[in-house]
């Protein structure tokens, strides 16, 4: 099995955390595009701080979350001009932590993916990419880490519908340099949004990869169906990024899929809760017409033949 951050060592906290009583999962912790890393017995929730920077909250029990800690503070001359720090993800690789996140960059005139590195999950993180690593003439967001069968790092990411023909967004991947500072291959296209049979838009959001013990490669991602924002799964026919990707015939998560799923939601990822136990995180709902966007956690089963809620 391969799953990002499957086994991350514990790190002692270097600062005292404060906990506000209303910052709980059951109390609908405000959050969009949540990403949770488990290091030792602690959970680190990364989220956007808007123009302030990238924030992280810590929990021992997945219910009570600390007040946010700034793990990357945007300098005064930061290249982002708007839409700062979309969907930050933190990945552990060979002793360091790497955050992928997206900004609208003055260096490219596009939505671009940048990378930050630290030796501790609470930072401080430093920019190692000199602004961005995604193709400079693309709108690109939602970078995530994938390690191939040889253990070499790739970035899977979104080629945004805003810079794609007919507004049909793509999912792409490219090899990363060993220090994650730049791409060392041309991107390959995995699939496009409207290959999903029940898609109603050209959106490709929130990729997250899982490879089973038998070598089957799956990718979580989000789009819109008639039921709103959803989570779906694609599988590579040859177990590699360059395979033909088959889309699932039904969403993994959608509004009304189970009686308790009363909101739409998406941009999901999977993290270990304990030995052989996993949770899926996502934000619900996707719009504020019913209630605000908040963290949702669902038990998930990872098996040789797929991903099941």
Image (spheres, rainbow, N blue to C red):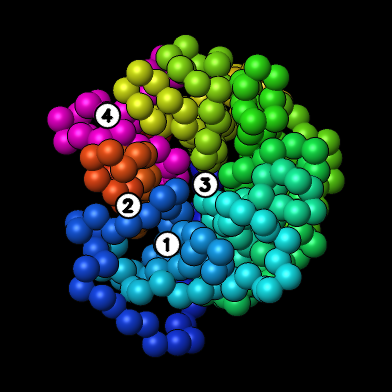
Q: Which residue is mark 2?
A: 295
Q: Residue furthest top?
A: 197
Q: Is residue 135 left or right of residue 75?
A: right
Residue 79, image quadrant: bottom right
Pick whichever of labels 4 and 3 is earlier in the sequence: 3
| Whether residue 230 can be seen here | yes
Q: Residue 203: give its label.
A: none
**Magenta part mainly helix, strand or loop?**
loop
| Whether residue 299 can be seen here | no
Residue displayed at 70% across by 66% down: 78
Q: Which residue is mark 3?
A: 3
- In terms of depth relative to the viewer, which is nearer, 238 or 103? 103
* Magenta region includes residue 263: yes
- Under tag 4, what secondary structure? loop
Q: Which residue is mark 1?
A: 45
- In terms of depth relative to the viewer, which is nearer, 257 or 214? 257
Pick whichever of labels 3 and 1 is earlier in the sequence: 3
* Magenta region includes residue 238: no
User: Closer to us: mark 3 or mark 1?
Assistant: 1
Q: CA distance from mark 4 to mark 3?
A: 26 Å
**Percent of width and height locating residue 260:** 16, 36
Q: Which residues are magenta?
A: 246-270
Label 2 crowding class (10 Å Cα cut-off): few <14, some 14-19, many 20+?
Answer: many
Residue displayed at 22% across by 26% down: 256
Q: Which residue is mark 4?
A: 255
């Amino acid at each position: 099995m391969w799953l990002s951050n499957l086994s991350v060592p514990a790190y002692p906290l270097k600062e005292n955390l404060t906990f506000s009583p209303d910052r709980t999962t059951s109390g609908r912790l405000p959050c969009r595009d949540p990403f949770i890393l488990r290091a030792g017995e602690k959970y680190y929730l990364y989220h956007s701080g808007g123009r302030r920077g990238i924030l992280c909250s810590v929990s021992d029990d997945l219910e009570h979350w600390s007040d946010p800690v700034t793990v990357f503070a945007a300098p005064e001359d930061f290249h982002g001009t708007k839409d700062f720090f979309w969907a930050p993800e933190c990945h552990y690789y060979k002793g360091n932590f790497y955050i992928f996140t997206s900004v609208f960059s003055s260096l490219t005139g596009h939505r671009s993916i940048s990378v930050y590195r630290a030796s501790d999950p609470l930072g401080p993180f430093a920019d190692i990419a000199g602004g961005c690593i995604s193709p400079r003439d693309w709108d690109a967001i939602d970078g995530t880490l994938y390690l191939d069968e040889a253990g070499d790092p790739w970035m899977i990411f979104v080629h945004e519908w805003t810079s794609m023909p007919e507004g049909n967004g793509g999912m792409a991947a490219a090899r990363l340099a060993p220090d994650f500072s730049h791409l060392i291959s041309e991107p390959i296209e995995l699939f496009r949004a409207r290959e999903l049979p029940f898609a109603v838009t050209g959106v490709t959001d929130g990729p997250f990869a899982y490879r089973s013990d038998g070598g089957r490669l799956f990718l979580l991602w989000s789009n819109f169906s008639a039921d709103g924002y959803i989570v779906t799964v694609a599988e590579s026919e040859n177990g590699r990024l360059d395979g033909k990707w088959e889309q699932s015939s039904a969403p993994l998560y959608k509004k009304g899929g189970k009686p308790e799923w009363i909101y739409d939601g998406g941009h999901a990822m999977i993290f270990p809760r304990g030995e052989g136990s996993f949770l899926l995180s996502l934000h619900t709902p996707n719009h504020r017409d019913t209630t605000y966007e908040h963290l949702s956690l669902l038990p998930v089963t990872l098996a040789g033949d797929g991903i099941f809620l």
